[in-house]
Every structure is written in structure tokens, then in C-alpha cells.
Image: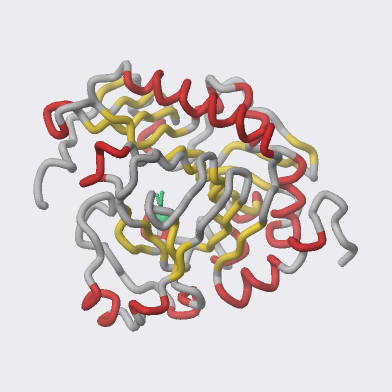
Amino acid sequence: MPANPLLSEANRDYVAHYWEHGYAVVRGLFTPAEMQEAQRESRRIYEEGLKHHATYRDHNVLFEILPESFSGQRYVLQAHWYAWFSPLFEKMRRDPRVLAVMEPLLGNDIKQVAQQIHWKPPGATRRSGYRFHQDLRFRDRNDVYRDLMTSYINTGLAIDPATAENGCLQVFPDSHKLGYLGLSDDGPIMKGSTQAHEMVAAGLDPAKVMNLELEPGDLALWGLLTVHGSNANQSQKDRAFAIQSYVKASSSERGEWAFKNGVSTPLGATPEICKYEQLREKPGPFYSDDKWYESGT
Ligand SMILES: O=C(O)CCC(=O)C(=O)O
Ligand SMILES: [Fe+2]
């Protein structure tokens, strides 16, 4: 394949790495200046989320709120599909550099099925970790998604520096070769932590876990079968991480177009079904009364 001029030489073996190990990191996809702007925009989105007393949904837009009744202060843990009110992130989701990364894996007809910022506000420690899981858990396991590793790719763009201390993404290299393991299928992933015996029972060696420490602008990639998670934030620095999931358009009826025949494609007039099938019957806006964060440790 001809070298892609949008990717630096150091970044050109990520495709082989993804195949071999189930994840990859592309360094410096966006510039420091662009990321400073993205950090400001991420804070603006956070402030927007803080206006909601509880988890809020309007079509694909969602703010996941940890309310003051639980933590003494209100925190925003996630925002979904902010492209609907953030022109900056609407453009970044379909930036030509994203196509350059995705094209060797997904081709050039690509839809996006998730867009989420995950914050780990220092005061929200008890609910800022993600137990180990495979993202296949979140998808219908029918034939909407075929050829798992190259019909669907998850990407995580570091907005803030992601470190071991503030709960960077962690992966089990090569775990995509093990099939679906059912990790954390017993409850919410944003609660508690995966115990070593659970990893061992699933055939994983806890010593093999890898921290993906990232600078702003670095992009991590992982597949539907790659075991990953992250620790709670143990530092005083937040970790804004922008997760975007891309699919080969021919293998998914869902999603918003990102690249149509290689052409960057803006959001249309109305939202498409992405993650939540309920979008059709219950588009919102509404507040959720799910208090998933309350029980347990
Ligand atoms: O934000 C993270 O560290 C991981 C999130 C994740 O894996 C997920 O939401 O599926
Ligand atoms: Fe995940």
C-alpha cells in the first residue's frame, strides 16, 4: 500500500500492530495547537453538562451525571454526540487524518456509531474507573456487525494527557484472539474494579496489562474483542478522552456518515440510530432515573 502522506513515518506500522496485538497508538494525529482548542471546547461541553441535575438524553446527545446526592458535588462523567452542538468536534470526527488512519482497516465508506467524551473529575474517584471488558458487550451480537475486527474500530483521542495516575486506557495485548470472554457482564462497567481472579478465570495474565499513556492529540485504536478498561483517577488532573467508534458502512445499518466514498460528510438534518434503538420510540429529551452509581462499593 502506498505510504499515506497524512501520517508520519513513525506511525505507519499501526495497522500491522492492530492486527497482531488488537490495539495500536497513532502519535500526534492532531497538533498541540488544535488540542488546546479541543481542551477549551471539552471544558465548555462539561459546563453544559453540569446544567443537568441527572443523566439527560436528547436523541443521541447524552450527559451522564454523577449527582451531588452521591458525591457531594455534581460531576459529568460522559457526554455523547456533542457534534450536534460543537462545530469543532463535528469537524474533528470526520477529519481527513481520521480517514487516513481508518481507511486501511475499514475502507472509505465509514459510519460513526459512537461519539463520547469520558471525563474523570478528581472528586468523582469512586465512579471514574472502567472495569475490564470487550466492547462487543455493547453491541447486538447479531449480524448487524460482521467480521468483528475490521468492521468496527474504536478510537480514543487524548484531549488531556492520559497517564497511569489519572486512569489512562489499559489493554491486554493479544486478547482479541481469545474470543468473547464475558468480563464484567454481571453489572455496570463504571463501578468497582476487575479483580485479578476474574482476569485469571478469563484466561488473562494480570501482569500483562498495558497502560496506554497518551499525549493530547494521540489516538488509540482497539477492536470489539480487545480486552480493555481503566483505573479510577488517583491524581488531581482530569482525563478527558474522546472515544469515537467507526464502522464499515456496508456492515452496519446504524450510524452517522463520517466518510462517504472517502468524502468527509457532515451530520444530516436529523440524527440516525447509533447506539440506542429506543431513539425511535423515545427520542427525548428526558432525564433518566437510573441510579446505577448508588449500590456497591
Ligand atoms: O474511558 C475509558 O477509559 C474506557 C471506556 C470504555 O472502554 C467504554 O466506554 O467502553
Ligand atoms: Fe470499552
* In this view, 251 is above or below 53: below
Residue 101: x percent and y percent? 72, 54
Viewer-nearest residue: 70 or 2: 70
Left or right, 163 with respect to 7, comes to left
Q: Looking at the image, which residue is at 44% across and 31% down?
A: 60
Q: Which quadrant is home to the N terminus?
A: bottom right
Residue furthest to the front in view is 236
Q: Looking at the image, which residue is at 69% across and 66% down?
A: 14
Quarter of the image holding residue 293? top left
Residue furthest to the right in view is 2
Q: Is residue 287 visible?
A: yes
How many marks are shown on the rendered structure?
Answer: 0
* In this view, 195 is above or below 45: below
Left or right, 190 with respect to 114, comes to left
Q: Looking at the image, which residue is at 24% across and 75% down?
A: 196
Residue 50: x percent and y percent? 32, 21
Left or right, 100 with respect to 161, comes to right
Q: How is the image coloured?
A: secondary structure
Q: Looking at the image, which residue is at 20% across and 61% down?
A: 186
Residue furthest to the top in view is 51
Residue 147: x percent and y percent? 58, 67
* In this view, 201 is above or below 125: below
Q: Is residue 139 visible?
A: no
Residue 88: x percent and y percent? 63, 25
Left or right, 236 with respect to 249, comes to left
